[in-house]
Image (spheres, rainbow, N blue to C red):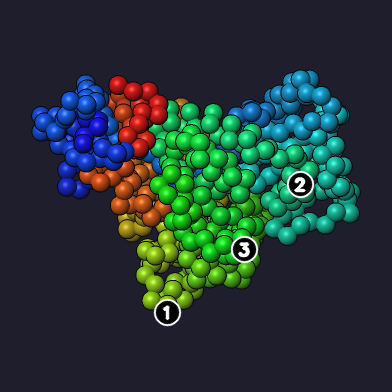
Amino acid sequence: MIEHILYNGNILTLDKDLKRAEALAISAGRIVAFGDTDEILDLATPTTIRENLNGQTVIPGLIDAHIHWKWTARVLKEVDVFEVPSKQVAIDRVADRAASLPPGEWIIGQGWIQELWEDRRFPTKADLDAVTPHHPVYLRAKSAHAFWVNSLALQMAGIDRHTPDPDGGYIQRDDQGEPTGILFENASRLITAQIPSMSVEETASAMLEAQKLALAAGLTGLHDFDGPDAMAALQLLRDRGQLALRVVKNVNKEWIHHAYELGIRWGFGDDWLRIGGVKIFADGALGPRTALMFKPYQGESDNYGVRVTDPEEMLQIVSMASAAGLPATIHAIGDRAVHDVLNVYETVRKQEAQRGELPYTRRHRIEHLQVIHPDDRYRLAELKIIASMQPIHATSDYLVADRYWGDRCEWAYNARWQIDQGVTVAFGSDSPIDPFEPLRGIHAAVTRQRQDGSPGEDGWYPQNRLTVDEALRGFTLGPAYAAGMENRLGKLAPGYLADLVVLNQDPYKVQPSELLEIKVLATMVGGIWRYGGL
């Protein structure tokens, strides 16, 4: 029985057999037919809901292939220091929050970038101490690989001049050896161990608020990279029938042994909540200059970045994961980190071949892939590795990338090259590092420009621009393949899940600069309008 028909529309299916259609029919949350308006309306029964699209454009549901969902939800309640223009603005916002909280409560915030400030210097604990003598403060840099804390937070964590640097991280110190209040990479865990955790109910409630915003942005699915507490909240929402996004839950390195013991394999779950791959960090990030590089950062002759996980340990983890039925998904930003990860994957691919396993059974990924060494440029294609990238990072990072990577930027944020080699790309936002608005990501991929038009009419390294079709596929078919759901997600075709977005304009027909003006009118997931409607 046909439950729902959308007709008189401009439906962009991304299906090779029929790229555009006027109407589609839905039953039991899936598309069962599509074609011309008259032929689809002929399928209707007296109980069928018929909705006129009035010529509006429909695209497949958009999927964010890299997001930190609990963290994104939590940030909505934290101090907003996202890309503030000066250190003083950040301090003032922390002071405002302190005035509304009882002594002893943590003040947490996200998004500062010292590169935007006049002196481009890292802040210190002293900058915060004057306004927060009675509140511990923990402010993540936008990259989430550097962290700014005050003296009280350091005291609560027991960090002083005698505290050794942890593996995979370090404590910034002044000339006298005292901690400055800036921590890098894994050193942040010394602080986060002191911060009270959100309960599962609190996390689920925050996720519901974030879900409303995601649906309004046209998202119908996401690949999450947070910890098991996020999984607990997602299961709670799933059990209550409140989960309206399709979630692939990746397993972070710290909890891999639990997955092994339980025998959980990639794809375990259902179409709403399922297991993805094993997440590992190879290096840091560009913002704090901890991304691992072959050559030093420009102006910092002794800085090659930070290796967060040794290649030997990575190989052991990925090899065991693959044998247990789990692909790996590895954060690698610097060219040396990408090289190390590719070496690991090359070895594991040989092991898989010896077991008779084809590459599509282990859909390994590199997360971010922000700069690749030219000598490695063919290796993702050769090894059939998925490039999980965030187009909006190119436009938000280009000034810093130019400053510290120089000519290496020709190979930075380069999805163009990977697509040309036949590599599957899966696009996302890395929210809350950048906003989870896929239309902004599509605009960034197509124009290589920020919202204000910088760095100019042609964009940053214009030869690396994508077409609208390529960018749209990066937010649909790519993530669907990465999740092992390409037979039911990523396009609009019979048998596919009825996940779709209604837009007020056709992205294929507007000028690239006008992509940001496109509005999401409605979002459907599983045949139900979850945002807006007709």
Residue kind at label 2, given as amino acid type: Ala
Secondary structure beneath dot 2 equals: loop
Q: Residues within 10 Å of mark 3 (few under 14, many from 20)?
A: few
Q: Could you tell whether 137 is left or right of 224 in the image?
A: right
Label 2 and label 1: CA atoms lie apart by: 42 Å
Whether residue 162 is visible to the viewer of this picture, yes or no, is yes
Q: Residues within 10 Å of mark 2 (few under 14, many from 20)?
A: few
Which residue is labeled 2 in the image?
A: 193
Q: Whole-percent x and y of residue 172?
A: 78, 48
Label 3 and label 1: CA atoms lie apart by: 24 Å
Q: Whole-percent x and y of residue 57?
A: 26, 29
Which residue is labeled 1 in the image?
A: 354
Looking at the rendered structure, which numbered label has been put on residue 362? none
Q: How many marks?
A: 3
In this view, the residue farthest toward the bottom is: 354
- Label whose residue precedes the other's in the sequence (2 or 3): 2
Q: Could you tell whether 442 is left or right of 307 in the image?
A: left
Image quarter of residue 83: top right
Q: Whole-percent x and y of residue 326?
A: 49, 63
Looking at the rendered structure, which numbered label has been put on residue 257? 3
Q: Quadrant of the C terminus?
A: top left
- Label whose residue precedes the other's in the sequence (2 or 1): 2
Q: Nearer the viewer, mark 3 or mark 1?
A: 3
Residue kind at label 1, given as amino acid type: Gln
Label 2 and label 3: CA atoms lie apart by: 21 Å
Secondary structure beneath dot 1 equals: helix
Secondary structure beneath dot 3 equals: helix
Q: What residue lies at 43% left-to-right and 44% top-to-bottom? A: 272
Q: Could you tell whether 415 is left or right of 166 in the image?
A: left
- Label whose residue precedes the other's in the sequence (3 or 1): 3
